[in-house]
């Protein structure tokens, strides 16, 4: 098998250094015309084909964008990745994705991925950085954009939703329908990753109820692990009590699906016996007719990729922030307390 010609072979035959041959290959103006012509002629004679990967590295580029996301199998992460991929589809960059489901993996990736020789840019989805890593990330020579990560990111480029406003929208919708005993099912507020979405959505929900003169009943508030089955168990307990809520706000559509399953198991009809509203507007929500708060998952991924492309072209002097407003999507799982859906 014939040995592949290398840049060293070209340099040797042209009588120049490897550095000079590389400068000719990369179009640098520091090489005189005679030397440039001689090197180019040798490249043609030897039929030298440069490695694109090696050439990119010599120019300080990898032509890759790296995405680090938490819990890739969750529909929220998948939808954001769709937005990122759609934004980069016509670009020259390849997409490399890392999934994080443990603190150890998160810490490892934050320390090893933001390096120029590994990637041209980094998008971090739903993973707030540890406080001790912030200063290093701020001074990284690789542009970094955070999507859906509020904690410890105020000095970094980021794309956020307004979870407090979204929680308020959910409460306002249920109050407008006449509900006063309203339950909440969400994630435990304290978690090792620093996720704040459930806490912020509950804050907006609680503030809106408080303004209406309503104090949530402690038995109507249930928090645990993020998942449909966990939410199902929490909702079964809540809905089995003598004084059950007439409506439940779930902090995610995944958890709302668990609440719907619990209502069905207990013989409750949605929305006549129980109104349910979720958060996210994942694809399954439309299929089951779930009323929800749309937090623009696809759009957040696309906005994150666009912000990163701008940062790769020219780093902004101050960290840029994009905020996407949530919207109510009304479907079949919420109705007036008196029976029958009220006109919007």
Image (tube, helix red, strand yellow):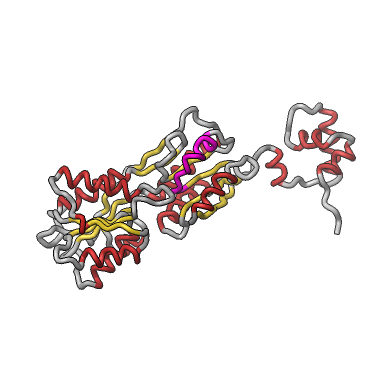
User: Residue sitting at 20 percent across and 51 percent down?
Assistant: 173
Q: Please tell me how many numbered marks the rendered image carries.
A: 0
Q: Is residue 94 magenta?
A: no
Q: Which residues are magenta?
A: 125-138
Where is residue 139, by image quadrant?
Answer: top right
In the image, 256 versus 29, the foreground residue is: 256
Residue 214 x %, y %: 14, 48
Residue 285 x %, y %: 32, 60
Q: Is residue 15 left or right of residue 293?
A: right
Q: Is residue 93 left or right of residue 187?
A: right
User: Residue sitting at 89 percent across and 35 percent down?
Assistant: 15
Q: Is residue 71 above or below residue 151?
A: below
Q: Is residue 27 left or right of residue 233?
A: right
Q: Is residue 133 magenta?
A: yes
Q: Is residue 34 above or below residue 247?
A: above
Where is residue 287, by image quadrant?
Answer: bottom left
In the image, 106 versus 142, the foreground residue is: 106
Q: Is residue 9 left or right of residue 261?
A: right
Residue 342 x %, y %: 14, 56
Q: Quadrant of the N terminus?
A: bottom right
In the image, 47 versus 74, the foreground residue is: 74
The residue positioned farthest toward the left in the image shown: 338
User: Residue sitting at 86 percent across and 43 percent down?
Assistant: 9
Residue 175 x %, y %: 16, 51
């Amino acid at each position: 098998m014939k040995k592949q010609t290398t840049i060293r072979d070209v340099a040797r035959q042209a009588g120049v250094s490897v550095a000079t041959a590389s400068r000719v290959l990369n179009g640098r103006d520091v090489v005189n015309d005679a030397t440039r012509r001689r090197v180019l002629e040798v490249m043609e004679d030897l039929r030298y084909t440069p490695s694109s990967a090696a050439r990119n590295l010599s120019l300080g580029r990898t032509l890759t964008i790296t995405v680090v996301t938490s819990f890739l199998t969750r529909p929220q992460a998948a939808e954001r990745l769709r937005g990122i991929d759609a934004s980069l589809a016509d670009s020259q960059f390849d997409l490399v994705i890392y999934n994080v489901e443990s603190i150890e993996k998160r810490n490892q990736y934050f320390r090893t991925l933001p390096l120029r020789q590994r990637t041209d840019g980094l998008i971090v989805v739903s993973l707030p950085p540890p406080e001790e890593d912030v200063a290093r990330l701020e001074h990284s020579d690789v542009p970094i954009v955070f999507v859906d990560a509020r904690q410890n990111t105020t000095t970094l480029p980021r794309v956020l939703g307004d979870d407090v406003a979204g929680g308020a929208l959910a409460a306002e919708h249920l109050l407008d329908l006449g509900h006063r005993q309203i339950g909440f099912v969400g994630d435990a507020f304290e978690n090792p990753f620093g996720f704040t979405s459930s806490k912020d959505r509950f804050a907006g929900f609680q503030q809106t109820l408080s303004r209406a003169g309503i104090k949530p009943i402690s038995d109507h508030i249930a928090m645990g692990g993020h998942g449909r089955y966990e939410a199902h168990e929490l909702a079964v307990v809540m809905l089995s009590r003598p004084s059950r809520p007439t409506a439940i706000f779930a902090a995610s559509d995944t958890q709302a699906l668990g609440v719907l399953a619990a209502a069905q198991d207990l013989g409750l009809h949605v929305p006549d016996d129980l109104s349910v509203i979720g958060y996210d507007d994942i694809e399954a929500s439309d299929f089951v007719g779930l009323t929800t708060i749309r937090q623009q998952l696809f759009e957040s991924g696309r906005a994150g990729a666009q912000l990163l492309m701008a940062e790769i072209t020219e780093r902004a002097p101050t960290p840029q922030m994009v905020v996407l407003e949530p919207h109510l999507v009304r479907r079949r799982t919420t109705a007036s307390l008196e029976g029958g859906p009220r006109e919007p």
